[in-house]
Amino acid sequence: MGWRDDWPSMPDGKPYDGMNLLQLTLDGKSPFGGVWDVRLLIREIEENLSTRVADIPFIDKGSNNYGFHLQTPDKRDLVARLARGDVNMPDFDGFPIEVQAPEARFETAVYNLLQSETLIRSSRLLYSRVPVQHPGPKLTIPQDLSGRRLFVFEKSEGVTNTWTDLSSGYKFLLLEQLASMRAALFRYNPPYEFAAEHLLERLFKFMPPSLAMPVAPTREFWMHVLEAKIEATIRGEGEMIGWEDDNETVGPAALAAKQSLLRAIPYLLPVDDSPEGSLYRLVLEHGDFGIHNTTIAIQAGSGEPLVTSLFDWETACVWPALLSDPLVAAGPVDLIVDEDGRPSVTRLPSEATQVDLETYAGWANHYIQMLYHEAPGYRAAVRAGKDFRKLWFALRDWRGGNSEEFFGALGAWAEKRARELDDDER
């Protein structure tokens, strides 16, 4: 099977168009027959929501999940998200249950946490469950859906991916709404219990199984986290570095870089001298913020777009304000800030013209200006944390391989930057 189901074809060989699934299933002609049973999905939703599925107008797929639009007899609209991979399938090689189960529990906790935060507009979760791995060998196709994570939401008004259909003015209006939502998320203070429970498990690889300090919104705590991350990433000489498939071990350049990085930590993490101690305040990061993870309704009469929900919190995490990432995916590009907090653009299309580049720059300026207006402390946090951010995101974005070259360059940068900062303090 690999790590996910293939999208099915119809008897004529054409890809299934996602339509008429309920009737096909009732007629015994489900396009998913032989892999998983649509009737089991319907039964689980009906039993847990005390309703009946009257229609499935449409189903599509993402990289990891199927997405179902469901309707009840009273015309209530629901959205179900079912994993395309089943941990009980023979030869399954996707994320193991040890990753999937905590991730599903965390995402459920996020939706429940944000239900009352109207400015963030998180989707309303109605039902969810984590995948369950059955004991024993996986020799036959599962007869149930328990190995697939499932989420059911109240369907928000609107659709996704409407960017290309909007006029220039409405694109700017939509960016203003996204900036307001992003600012609200930056201002939001997650409960300490939530942060303490989920912070470590949501940090990207590599980390130790536990920390020696309790979670706290302080410079000292994040110095400890960064030290633990470096120690877990670059272990002893000759030990594995990166992922098993990389077949690499810690060499002399990486080992020397480890010491350089550890020595630089006190210089790279700024002292928080703001009156409210806001730099290390814990924030909830969406992790994949953009138009592709929102529903957008077009207002009757005016034709104006309105963001009605923000979904897909699978990559969310908790970390300090000075690491908060204002990136928003807007159509063909990502709108970001540079190390000094100035608007910038990345993920540029290769065929972009000069006019396109000017347009993208205009989007970035508008979005970031609105974001700073709604969250005045955002730019100060970005600028204060520029060295911490450079190191943190470099570690996050490393995909393994070439460890000697990668960490050698990173260690050299850390040494140089620490000397510069030390000279500035004298």
Image (cartoon, grey):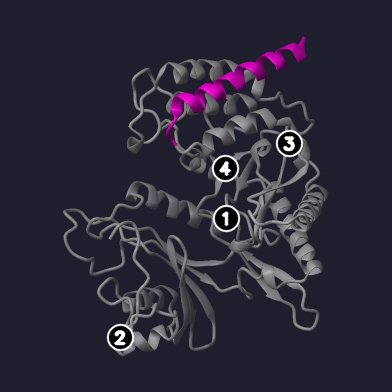
As drawn, the label of residue 381 is: 3
Q: CA distance from mark 4 to mark 3?
A: 16 Å
Find out whether residue 88 is within the magenta segment: no
* Disc 1 residue crowd, few under 14, some 14–19, many 20+, Cα 10 Å: some
| Label 1 secondary element | helix
Point 37% across, 70% down: residue: 7
Q: Which residue is mark 1?
A: 113
Residues rendered magenta in the picture: 400-426
Mark positioned earlier in the residue sequence (4 or 1): 1
* Disc 3 residue crowd, few under 14, some 14–19, many 20+, Cα 10 Å: many
Is 84 on the left or on the right of 267, as rendered? Answer: left
Mark positioned earlier in the residue sequence (1 or 2): 2
Quadrant of the snapshot with the C terminus: top right
Q: Which residue is mark 2?
A: 29
Of circles 2 and 4, the one toward us is 2
| Label 3 secondary element | helix
Point 80% across, 55% down: residue: 362
Mark positioned earlier in the residue sequence (2 or 4): 2
Of circles 4 and 3, the one toward us is 3
Q: CA distance from mark 3 to mark 2?
A: 56 Å
Of circles 3 and 1, the one toward us is 3
State if disc 1 and disc 4 touch (CB < 8 Å): no
State if disc 4 and disc 2 touch (CB < 8 Å): no
Q: Which residue is mark 4?
A: 318
Quadrant of the snapshot with the N terminus: bottom left
Mark 4 is on which residue type?
A: Val
Mark positioned earlier in the residue sequence (3 or 2): 2
* Disc 2 residue crowd, few under 14, some 14–19, many 20+, Cα 10 Å: some
Of circles 4 and 1, the one toward us is 4
| Label 4 secondary element | strand
